[in-house]
Amino acid sequence: MIQTQEYKRQTSAKLPKRSWIQRNPRLFQVTFVTTSLLVFFSKPIYDIFFAERLPHPRNKVKS
């Protein structure tokens, strides 16, 4: 009986391999949301920080 108990302790159910998303759900959510927002707002972000400024039309010429 002792031998059978030891054998039962050693064997366990074989679990299927979990994907990276299932193992790290919070990191996946943060990465996905951050990437999506960066793609969605890429043009405004570029315009705010990197685009050259246009000269400000102070005096408009009337025709």
Image (spheres, helix red, strand yellow):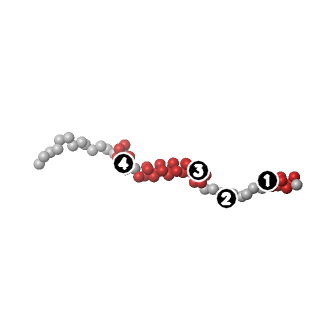
Q: Distance from label 4 to label 3 (Cα)? A: 31 Å
**Tag in front: 4 or 2:** 2
Q: Do the residues labelled 2 and 3 touch (CB within 8 Å)?
A: no
Query: Label 1 neighbourhood size at 10 Å, few (<14), some (14-19), many (20+)?
Result: few
Q: Horizontally, is 39 left or right of 3 in the view? A: left
Query: Label 4 neighbourhood size at 10 Å, few (<14), some (14-19), many (20+)?
Result: few
Amino acid tagged 2: Pro
| Residue 26 locus on image (x, y percent) | 55, 48
At 83% from the left and 53% from the top, the residue drawn is 5
Which residue carries the number 2 mark? 16
Q: Distance from label 1 to label 2 (Cα)? A: 18 Å
At 61% from the left and 56% from the top, the residue drawn is 19
Secondary element at tag 1: helix
| Residue 51 locus on image (x, y percent) | 34, 45
**Tag in front: 1 or 4:** 1
| Residue 6 locus on image (x, y percent) | 83, 52
Q: Distance from label 3 to label 1 (Cα)? A: 28 Å
Q: Do the residues labelled 3 and 1 touch (CB within 8 Å)?
A: no
Q: Which of 1 and 23 is in front in this view?
A: 1
Q: Sequence order check: which comes first, mark 3 or mark 1?
A: 1
Q: Sequence order check: which comes first, mark 1 or mark 4?
A: 1
Secondary element at tag 4: helix
Which residue carries the number 4 mark? 44
Q: Sequence order check: which comes first, mark 4 or mark 2?
A: 2
Q: Which mark is residue 10?
A: 1
Amino acid tagged 1: Gln
At 45% from the left and 52% from the top, the residue drawn is 36
Q: Which of 22 and 2 is in front in this view?
A: 2
Which residue carries the number 3 mark? 24
